[in-house]
Image (spheres, rainbow, N blue to C red):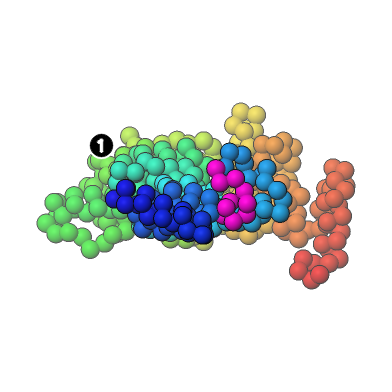
Amino acid sequence: MTEGLFAALDRALASPSPAGALDLLIAEFREGGSYALLFEARNMKKRLELGLPLIQTEDSSTFPAEARAAYEQAMIEAAREAGELYLAAGNIPAGYRYLRAIGETAAVADALEQAQPGDDFEAVVAIAFQEGVHPARGLELILRQHGMCRAITAFGMYAVAKDRDRCIRLLVTELHAEIAGRMARVIEQQEGSKPDARNLPALMSGRDWLFGEYDYYVDTSHLTSLLPYALETTDAATLQLFGELCEYGRHLSPNFHFKDQPPFEDGYTDYGCFVDAVLGRDAGRQIEHFRRKAEACDPEADGTNPAQVLVNLLVRLERYADALEAFQQFLASEDPARLQCPGALHLCHMAKQYDRLRLLARERGDLLSYAAASLSERVPPGTV
């Protein structure tokens, strides 16, 4: 085969059009799946067309300006073809190398949706999760291959931003399903029939015997690691699952209860109150729950997290004026660098209290915020 190709190549090289020899190689590499060589052959052909050195020893930035733009566009097209062909062949890592170089990773994300564990599993997961091309799919692959513990650890280690809510939903859904499945099997063994319910409150209702001193249905460290993500998720279905997990946790023996940082000292109860508030379940009572914690907190000893949680909760509920009042009551002297909630100026804007915003801005010598407050009052956003 190789000798035959060399003979065909020699004939093409002897023809009046030397580009024909490269066309021959391009077709051969494309047909034979040698996509890295296809990329190089396409670039060589473009260098031939532009009168550039056939063997490239310097970066394209050194090429004459009139040739550089055309050559770099040809490189992009060659990389796109090689990358897409690798993806079509199931070689995601190779395809990603080419498509990442030209900033076109959407096709890689699509390919990751169909990816399954294989010899290149770790490389695929690294692209999906660590590289951030498709974090939710990467986390799903980790979960399927290595289990919940590894998935939770991975999610906590990396600052996942893209698809973050989807990742949280995936973890919570899987943990909820584990608890429900194991609980249903115990109920079937005890009662002789499998329960129809799949939600935790229905499974637990009237079955206090499920919770002895040492009975639990999932590694409690997995549960306690996930609950703090309830503070950030915006998906109602995910929050519903968080609420069920908190109720499940409250049924556990005190041996398995946990204490988190204030204001979540009674973990299952306090996170449950936050979730209930966001879901609109007696929100006023839940707000007072956190207000009492903020009032009882000693900022010197315990920090200001209880007050910041209260402010964030009020913002989530779009009670901006109340959030501003809480901020002024508990956080007015807090170092802005330590805030994990909106600051006073931001809250004034959210509450549309422009007089107050102007006053605060003047006290702080903040000319820009002062101007913004004055203009916002005169010209409401969206009217210009």
Q: Mark 1 points at which residue?
A: 214
The answer to whether residue 338 is seen in the rendering is: yes
Secondary structure beneath label 1: loop
Residue 222 percent coordinates (x, y): 37, 41
Residue at (85%, 50%) from the top-left corner?
368
Q: Which of 383 and 33 is in front in this view?
A: 33
The number of numbered discs placed on residues in the rendered structure image is 1
Residue 267 percent coordinates (x, y): 44, 41
Characterize the local packing of mark 1: few (<14), some (14-19) or many (20 or more) Cα atoms within 10 angstroms.
few
Name the residue type under label 1.
Answer: Tyr
- Extreme residue in the bottom direction: 383
Residue 198 percent coordinates (x, y): 28, 59
Residue at (55%, 43%) from the top-left corner?
55
Q: In which quarter of the image is residue 169?
A: bottom left
Residue at (43%, 42%) from the top-left corner?
126
Q: Nearer the viewer, residue 265 or 292?
A: 265
Q: Which of 211 and 196 is in front in this view?
A: 196
Residue at (48%, 46%) from the top-left corner?
97
Residue 92 shown left or right of residue 218 in the figure: right
> Which part of the image, by quadrant, shows the C terminus?
bottom right
The answer to whether residue 286 is seen in the rendering is: no
Over which residues does the magenta segment extend?
A: 46-55
- Extreme residue in the left direction: 192
Q: In which quarter of the image is residue 227?
A: top left
Residue 375 shown left or right of residue 61 in the figure: right
Q: Is 51 one of the magenta-colored residues? A: yes
Q: Is 74 one of the magenta-colored residues? A: no
Q: Which of 42 and 152 is in front in this view?
A: 42
When the figure is inspected, residue 30 is found, relative to residue 221, above or below; the finding is below
When the figure is inspected, residue 328 is found, relative to residue 319, above or below; the finding is above
- Extreme residue in the top direction: 301
